[in-house]
Image: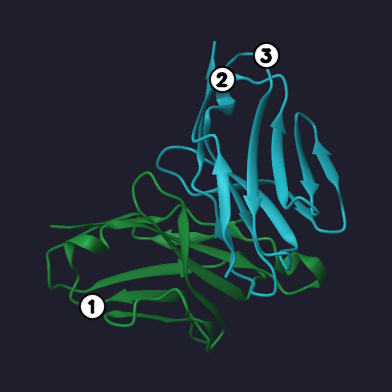
Chain colours: A cyan, B green
Amino acid sequence: GENVEQHPSTLSVQEGDSAVIKCTYSDSASNYFPWYKQELGKGPQLIIDIRSNVGEKKDQRIAVTLNKTAKHFSLHITETQPEDSAVYFCALSGSARQLTFGSGTQLTVLP
Amino acid sequence: NAGVMQNPRHLVRRRGQEARLRCSPMKGHSHVYWYRQLPEEGLKFMVYLQKENIIDESGMPKERFSAEFPKEGPSILRIQQVVRGDSAAYFCASSSVTGHSYNEQFFGPGTRLTVL
């Protein structure tokens, strides 16, 4: 089945700096790669996603890159703000529509 | 523009009781997924349903757990004879069927189950 590893588990950055979170996977049939932000006590919120026919996607301060050959994808947040502090999860799916999630990254943006 | 709705938000049960968790998908969505999240962990898939059909229940424990998505009304995740290990946050997500958007899953706020 699909498996995904996420690093780092915790990340602290200064406000205004960039944050990068990386996920690696093993199943080459995976073709959809979303990222979710989860704030304390809330459900995961879809922030950006990418499909296997695209190498990069950007939405304002957030970007995702995908390297299908190396089987890894990354979330990039630029100009971080304190409200970006949350747990971020990568996920993926392939022929089966359910999502397989990474273990999460606790991002803390220090003012 | 209501999103995915779940209730109750918090549920406390004693060991041996039954827990019923409800999920109403986003308007226009006919696919529902249930996930479980243990403290400090990622979400784990449990079951995928369409109206009146269970499509994939490979993540469901074999005993005590069941799910349904009737023609009318919300999807229900039912846990019989709860044990302390069932304490977790249970999230429902929904997606539509058109084009690529079937992949995009939108999550509800979750039900936090505590078993005493």
Q: Name the residue under label 3.
A: A16
Q: In which quarter of the image is the N terminus of chain B?
A: bottom right
**Disc 1 residue type (three-letter):** Gln
Q: What residue type is labelled 2?
A: Pro
Mark seen at residue A75: none
- For this orientation, the residue located farthest to the top is A111
Q: Which badge, 2 or 3, is on the more N-terminal residue? A: 3
* Residue B21, image x, y percentages: 35, 68
Mark number for residue B80? 1
Judge by depth and name the residue closer to the eye, A80 or A74.
A74
Which part of the image, by quadrant, shows the C terminus of chain B? bottom left
Q: What element carries label 2?
A: helix
Q: Percent x, y for residue A1?
A: 57, 70
Pinpoint residue B97: horizontal percent, then vertical percent.
Answer: 73, 74
Host chain of mark 2: A
Crowd band around label 2 with a 10 angstrom C-alpha radius: few (<14), some (14–19), many (20+): some
Query: Residue drawn at (12%, 64%), measured in percent from left and top?
Result: B14
Residue kind at label 3, given as amino acid type:
Gly
Which labelled disc corresponds to residue A82? 2
Residue at 84%, 43% (x, y): give it: A56
Relative to A9, is B99 above or below? below
Would you say the residues marked 2 and 1 are in contact, meaning their CB atoms lie under 8 Å apart?
no
Q: Specify few, some or many for label 3: CA neighbours under 10 Å numbering under 14, 14-19, or 20 or more.
A: some
- Dot 1: element: loop
Judge if badges 2 and 1 mark residues of a common chain. no
Q: How far apart are marks 2 and 3 (CA)?
A: 9 Å
